[in-house]
Image: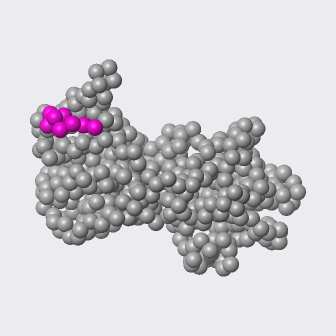
């Protein structure tokens, strides 16, 4: 069959939930037997978010092929349970870089390069690449930002042209808007939605469906009004009140018959009865009263929780599977350096140190690792969190605080973390990065082997510096196990400590492969260790 395209735009305000909505509907169509993929069109001019501050952009989500992408791709993968690739995140920077590169090569035969057709053609080419590279029958395309943003205009124009290129039967436009509540009168107002749709129609796109988002229930009369003034079929105006639980969204959308409307308009028939029992069980478990465990997340961007979105969700997935409720204690690593936040660390049943770059707050993370080791508190280190574990343990073994990573102290006499020799001459930002999926061999008789229950895995990476092999013997003799190694034994992928309830660090980012109904085994093992520790203490 021809590829079907579902385009999602946003109106009134940003952060209205387009990504979660796309992911949830994608899951519903997958449950009906269709191959689904999702693409995010980001209007910013950066090539990707890889060099952007987490304070600006939140988490950088890494895919199997090493693409550094928007955090919405994490929602897509977690909800739909699929693996995406680099064509699933397109930025203005990528589009213009490609067009300018072609112009420099003479591909346009000296023609004048314009937004239409050259930029829009490149956008459409990248949209079509999704089905070609993933085999998807239905492709969701989400446009970042809101209608009316000047940066989004080329993307919206490309989406307008797609209907003419692909045919009305193969394209569907969903507009997601915010319906504000006026506190003084207690009313919900549809006028902003009307203006947003008028703006969209002024550039040639008439939405086939409007999803009206609000913190308050939207009555039938308001939906009738939106349908009348926005010229949308009444059954295609979908009220969507803010969900109490993120993972409840697919179940709420299922009740609105959005999937049936989409398939009807796209000329498709359901291939199998959707089975959402796993999601229903997930939501029931989220609502159930459970014993609470406190996990200190010691990071340097904790003011913005979205900087650790995948970590937060992976903790939740694992906690649900173990039958406990997680409470995250957000601790700024710089505060620990100044003696603040220590009382929160003492409250914690477990400690997690996530990834990051740069020297700021490093000694605070090392303090957290030392506290976990000395007090037998379960510890999970991710990427930089593993390196911190190694630095702290090596300082203990070598009895000197001069142990460090050359990322933070180029002159350290004990560089237990360092660049590999073949990385030293690379200067481009990202040029020295190990990005994407890499294989790892699990060593038998270790915590990692207990968790994975297999001897060969592949995990996603995003880092520059590696464990320095010259220190393997000394640390091994002192009680460190190198439980995960690259197939050639050259790179340490997992390090853990003997004689500890659970103290393990990974050079990779396991949080990127955790799913709501399929939690990551290392996170599960971590939460189990916390639960056992808490039970033993009580």
Give residue 526's position: percent from left, percent from top. 62, 62
Give residue 347's position: percent from left, percent from top. 69, 46
For the N terminus, the image quarter is: bottom left
Using the rendered image of the protein, determine whether residue 334 is visible from the camera's viewpoint: yes
* Along the line of sight, the residue nearer the viewer: 129 or 467: 467
Q: Is residue 227 magenta?
A: no
- Report the coloring of the rendering: one colour
* Along the line of sight, the residue nearer the viewer: 253 or 336: 253
Give residue 444's position: percent from left, percent from top. 66, 79
Give residue 440's position: percent from left, percent from top. 59, 73
- Give, as a single range, the part of the protein colored magenta: 217-225
- Asked if residue 483 is positioned above or below residue 28 in the image, the reply reads below
- Asked if residue 457 is positioned above or below residue 416 in the image, the reply reads below
* Along the line of sight, the residue nearer the viewer: 161 or 520: 520
Q: Is residue 356 left or right of residue 417?
A: left
Q: Residue at x 16, y 42 (%)?
A: 206
User: Which image quadrant for residue 425?
Assistant: bottom right
Q: Is residue 218 magenta?
A: yes
Q: Residue at x 13, y 58 (%)?
A: 264
**In the current view of this chain or complex, which residue is farthest to the top?**
184
């Amino acid at each position: 069959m021809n590829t079907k395209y579902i385009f999602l735009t946003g109106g009134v305000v940003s952060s209205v939930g387009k990504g979660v909505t796309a992911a949830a509907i994608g899951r519903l169509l997958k449950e009906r037997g269709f191959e689904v993929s999702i693409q995010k069109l980001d209007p910013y001019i950066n090539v990707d978010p890889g060099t952007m501050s987490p304070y600006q952009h939140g988490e950088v989500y890494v895919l199997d092929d090493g693409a550094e992408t928007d955090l919405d791709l994490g929602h897509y993968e977690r909800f739909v349970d699929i693996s995406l690739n680099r064509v699933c995140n397109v930025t203005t920077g990528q589009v213009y870089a490609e067009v300018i590169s072609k112009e420099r090569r003479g591909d346009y035969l000296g023609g004048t390069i314009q937004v239409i057709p050259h930029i829009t053609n490149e956008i459409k080419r990248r949209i079509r690449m999704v089905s070609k590279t993933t085999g998807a029958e239905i492709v969701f395309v989400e446009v970042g930002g809101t209608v009316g943003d000047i940066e989004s205009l080329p993307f919206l124009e490309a989406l307008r042209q797609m209907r003419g290129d692909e045919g009305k039967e193969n394209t569907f436009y969903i507009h997601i808007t915010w319906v504000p509540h006026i506190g003084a009168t207690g009313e919900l107002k549809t006028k902003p939605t009307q203006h947003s749709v008028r703006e969209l129609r002024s550039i040639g796109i008439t939405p086939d469906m409007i999803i009206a988002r609000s913190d308050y229930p939207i009555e039938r009369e308001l939906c009738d009004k939106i349908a009348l003034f926005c010229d949308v079929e009444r059954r295609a105006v979908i009220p969507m009140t803010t969900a109490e639980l993120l993972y409840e969204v697919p179940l709420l959308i299922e009740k609105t018959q959005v999937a049936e409307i989409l398939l009807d308009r796209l000329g498709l028939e359901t291939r199998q009865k959707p089975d959402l029992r796993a999601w229903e069980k997930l939501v029931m478990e989220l609502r159930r009263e459970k014993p609470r465990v406190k996990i200190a997340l010691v990071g340097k961007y904790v003011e913005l929780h979205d900087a650790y979105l995948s970590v937060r969700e992976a903790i939740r997935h694992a906690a649900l599977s173990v039958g406990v409720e997680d409470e995250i204690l957000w601790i700024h690593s710089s505060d620990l350096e100044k003696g603040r936040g220590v009382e929160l660390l003492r409250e914690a049943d477990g400690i997690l140190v996530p990834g990051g770059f740069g020297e700021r707050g490093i000694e605070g993370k090392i303090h957290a690792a030392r506290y976990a080791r000395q007090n037998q508190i379960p510890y999970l280190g991710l990427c930089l969190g593993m390196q911190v574990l190694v630095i702290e343990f090596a300082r203990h073994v070598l009895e000197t605080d001069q142990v460090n990573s050359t990322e933070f102290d180029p002159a350290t006499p004990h560089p237990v973390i360092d660049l590999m020799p073949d990385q030293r001459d690379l200067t481009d930002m990202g040029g020295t990065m190990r990005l994407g999926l890499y294989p790892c061999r699990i060593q038998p008789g270790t915590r990692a082997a207990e968790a994975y229950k297999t001897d060969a895995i592949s995990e996603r990476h995003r880092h520059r510096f590696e464990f320095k092999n010259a220190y393997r013997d000394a640390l091994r003799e002192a009680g460190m196990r190198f439980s995960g190694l690259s197939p050639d034994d050259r790179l340490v992928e997992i390090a853990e400590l003997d004689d500890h309830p659970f103290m393990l660090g990974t050079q990779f980012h396991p949080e990127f492969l955790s799913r709501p109904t399929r939690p990551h085994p290392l996170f599960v093992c971590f939460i189990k260790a916390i639960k056992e520790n808490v039970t033993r203490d009580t």
